[in-house]
Amino acid sequence: MKNSILSLTALSLLFFNCNSESDPFLIQKNSIGALTATSQVKDLETIFKNDSVVKFEPGTPFTGSINEIEVFEKGGKKLLTLSPSALQDSTAVIKTVQVLDPRYKTNTELSTLSTFKDIADHYKISSIDNLINSIVVSVDELNASFTIDKMELPSNLRFDMTLHIEASQIPDNANIKYFFLNW
């Protein structure tokens, strides 16, 4: 009797583990859905089999030296922009992912629709870089960078690039402009 209960429990666990698919929109430190830090360009068609993958040919008159791969939903909505580590190399890994679609979220629900408060409440901020028109908030825990437009900051912080901006100076409701994963 104990063996049959144990066998039934083991079979149930195996069944649930086999049927559970990973969340295609989950952002983690070294992955976003099925795309990982070790995924190669040649694997993108398989990883995004339900989406459209558009690769630019560098050096053509219209693209110049663009080294980006765009991922679109079948309906035409742009989901991600990927930058491989090398031009025209199918074995190159993806080094940067720009997250565009708000369905992509971390396990703490952080997405492109989040605010600075959402970042600060759930993650340790590694650094804040002061650029011309924006600041970049880096979170090593995710290998992520969040760009916030300086128009979201108080006016005394907008124009001096030499200022060291602290997290306490950034308004809680400052919106994320861009969200990047860097591997």
Image (cartoon, rainbow, N blue to C red):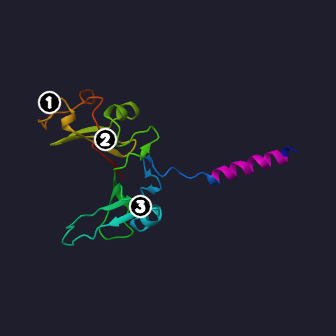
Within the magenta stretch, is there residue 10? Answer: yes
Q: Residues within 10 Å of mark 3 (few under 14, many from 20)?
A: few
Image depth: mark 3 or mark 2 in front? 3
Pick out the residue farthest to the right.
1
Q: Position of residue 69 (x, y in %)?
A: 33, 62
What's under tag 2, amino acid-wise? Ser
Q: Vertical placement of 126 versus 30: above or below?
A: above
> What numbered label is drawn on residue 138?
2
Is 90 magenta? The answer is no
> Label 3: which residue?
74
Q: What element carries label 2?
A: strand
Residue at the extreme bottom of the image, as rendered: 60
Our reading of the magenta stretch's main secondary structure is helix
Q: Which residue is drawn at 18% across and 36% down?
A: 151
Task: Please report the bounds of the magenta region as a residue range.
Answer: 3-17
Q: Where is residue 107 in the image (x, y as percent from the top left)?
A: 47, 40
| Cα distance between the residues tagged 3 and 2 | 32 Å
Residue appearing at x 44%, y 56% in the figure: 36
Q: Is residue 11 above or below residue 125?
A: below
- Cβ–Cβ below 8 Å for labels 3 and 1? no
Q: In the image, is residue 106 above or below residue 154?
A: below
Query: What amino acid is found at the position of numbered circle 1 in the picture?
Result: Ser
